[in-house]
Image (tube, rainbow, N blue to C red):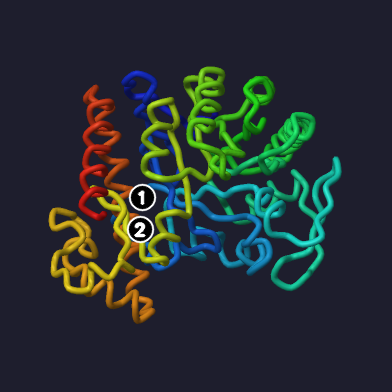
Amino acid sequence: MTELFQYRLKATDGAARLGEISTPRGAIRTPAFMPVGTAGTVKGMYPEQVRALGADIILGNTYHLMLRPGAERVAALGGLHEFARWPHPILTDSGGFQVMSLAALRKLTEQGVTFRSHIDGTFYELTPERSVEIQGLLGADIQMQLDECVRLPATREEIARALRLSLRWAERSKRAFEAQPPGRALFGIVQGGDDPELRVESARGLVDIGFPGYSIGGLAVGEPQEVMLRMIETVAPILPIDRPRYLMGVGTPDDIMESVARGIDMFDCVMPTRAGRHALAFTRFGRINLKNARHADDPRPLDEASDCPAARDYSRAYLHHLIRCDEMLGSMLLTWVNLAYYQSLMAGIRAAIDEGRFESFKAEVKEGWARGDIAER
């Protein structure tokens, strides 16, 4: 870490951690949920709304932004913060996961990965050096090393090959990152699939290289929750206590709370925005599916006690109507509801850790979900 990028552990409650990341663009309170702005926008939301909900940081995607509008173009227009009208911290992923999952005709070598765009077939090469260069052109405050994320299930040999390649790429990413301005940070990514021994090998290798923060990748990709949590329990004790820990692509509110209980500090996931576009609301009463006909005559709001106007001021009947008519306002309102709930949950988690009552808070939240699930049925 540098003087301009610092992590401070402020309190613990069991393995749960309350902290703060300092960056030149502002502080990030942890545990933190980062709304996903894949192409430079959190879908369905104004930047000011996202900030007002309590988000300290958002996520941008290297793969999508390198395809369009292009990293050099974004840099010429003042960088991603200026381009997207978000003056606060931004984290970018490396693009590796999207290359593996979206790109056509890809080829992986020691040097990097070559692929054709899923948009127009244009040929690209992404190396550890180019990934870091793109993230630097975007101006991201927190950047990710390029890694190879193996789809599960996979053989142990395949998982081991990928994690060792990722470790070599981590070293190259770190060397490439040295040219960037102070105040930014590069995180290493722990791989190893669902194999505890390989997870330990990856984590120890990254700690030996040395990063200001560490991510856990390759989870929440379809494996059972207990497998994900077991991998976190395996990895977290190896990671330095004075560095932030980021679980990539996670997840549901329950995944987040259980991962916080095991020492994770940062999260991102498309779930709240994607669910909003598919009529699903996350609330303190659990999930509510606004497609269900039972809501057609229901004058109640989703949550009359919510601070979010979308949850407090619009009836379930109206939201159901918007969804049935395929009106974009329905998706926008439910996205607002969901991101508000996620940020409210994170604020509650932080307060509970600070007051030494995280386990009781977790139990209360889950009890509320259970009661709501019964009522919804």
- Of residues 325 and 144, the one drawn nearer to the viewer in this rendering: 325
- Give how far across and how far down residue 134 sits, in percent: 67, 54
37 or 363: nearer the viewer: 363
The answer to whether residue 163 is above or below residue 331 is above
Q: CA distance from mark 1 to mark 2?
A: 6 Å
Q: Are marks 1 and 2 in contact (CB under 8 Å)?
A: yes
**Location of the N terminus (image quadrant):** top right
Label 2: few (<14), some or many (≥20) within 10 Å? many
- Helix, strand or loop under label 2: helix
- Residue 211 in percent (x, y) is at 61, 29
Q: Amino acid at mark 1?
A: Ala
Looking at the image, residue 63 sits to the left or right of residue 360; the answer is right
Give the number of the disc on residue 55: 1
**Disc 2 marks which residue?**
50
Residue closest to the eye, 32 or 70: 32
Q: Is residue 166 left or right of residue 61?
A: right
Badge 1 element: loop
